[in-house]
Image: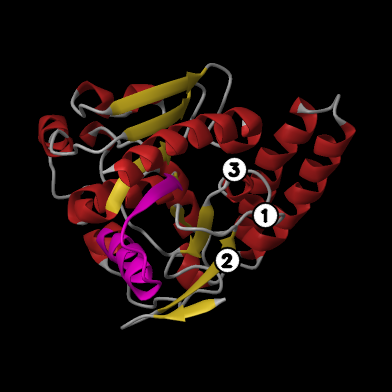
Amino acid sequence: MFLELKDTTLYYEEFGAGNRYILSSMQHLDPDRKGWPYDLAEEGYHVYAIQMRGYGQSAHVEEGYGESWYDVWADDVADFAAAKGIRRFLYTGASDGGGVGWHLCLRHPELLIAFVGLAAGPHSRSIGNSSPSRKYTIDAVGSKAAMEQLARYHRQRILYFSQKFADDPELKEEFLQKAEKFYDMKIQMTPEEMKIQPGITLPWLKTDEEVLEALSSIHFPVLLLVGIKDAMVPIGKTIQPIAVIENAKAVFYQEANHLLYYGRRNDVRREIAAFAAEVFSKEESQ
């Protein structure tokens, strides 16, 4: 489905029903629509999975937004909610989608019942303005060989889970097929998609101390799910917001990597569903 906003068009999919809304924005939806956040609909929540501006079936962007990408994406989520008549919602995002969540927290706190971030950082300012993985993608533009290598890398990331779940024939087969779908998805990315360079979240904050001070203004519940073996958002290179957010909780998965919603699918579902039940019940009682 598509939603026309004031200056863009967003592709989205809807799961479940009711007025307990969960919104999530992401570069690409899971090819099979399995696991997080789709399975939260089975827990009684009304889930909207929104494809970020610039990617896939949402409107593409030729010129870019410099350091304002996350602001734009956060405002898109806010505008999406307004267009759908959603007054307040729980937002959940992973990786870049988690970055969108932090910007929502600071730009549109009145809309959020809670925020759930998976591999969401935020990054320490010590990493600079961009991650190595983003640079690899940008450098691959215009090179068939580099794009092939990049697509193979993403296929291999998913094949890891077919090995992890080798004793479960259903899961093993799912991830074997999903790996090929990811390969196709990456090989078909357009140059304007690959060139997107949002930098790090909250770029106007130049020191870790400034980041923590800004995050201390968040007073609604926050749940962070973290993979200890996350190489893309290594725990040693993130700022720990649980130290300053009064209603924050973090769950650490010892063997999980950046794609912890695949490696710990059932745990992620249970953790978010329980957290959401509590925050929505509190919201509805007020």
Snapshot colouring: secondary structure
* Residue 282, x across and y down, in percent: 33, 38
Q: Nearer the viewer, residue 71 or 23?
A: 23
Q: Is residue 96 visible?
A: no
Q: State the separation of the CA atoms marked 3 and 1.
A: 15 Å
Mark 1: amino acid: Arg
Check the image and name the residue furthest to the top.
Answer: 254
Q: What's the amino acid at mark 2?
A: Glu
Query: Residue 27's spot in the image, x, y percent?
Result: 50, 59
What stretch of residues is rendered in magenta? 71-93
Residue at point 40%, 63% (across, down): 196
As helix, strand or loop, the secondary structure at mark 3 comes to: helix
Residue beneath label 2, please?
13
Closer to the N terminus: mark 3 or mark 1? 1
Numbered disc in front, either 2 or 3? 3
Q: Nearer the viewer, residue 226 or 45?
A: 45
Q: Residues within 10 Å of mark 3 (few under 14, many from 20)?
A: some
Identify the residue at image location x=28%, y=35%: 127
Give me the disc on residue 33. Answer: 1
| Residues tagged 1 and 2 counted as in contact (Cβ below 8 A) | yes
* Numbered disc 2: secondary structure: strand
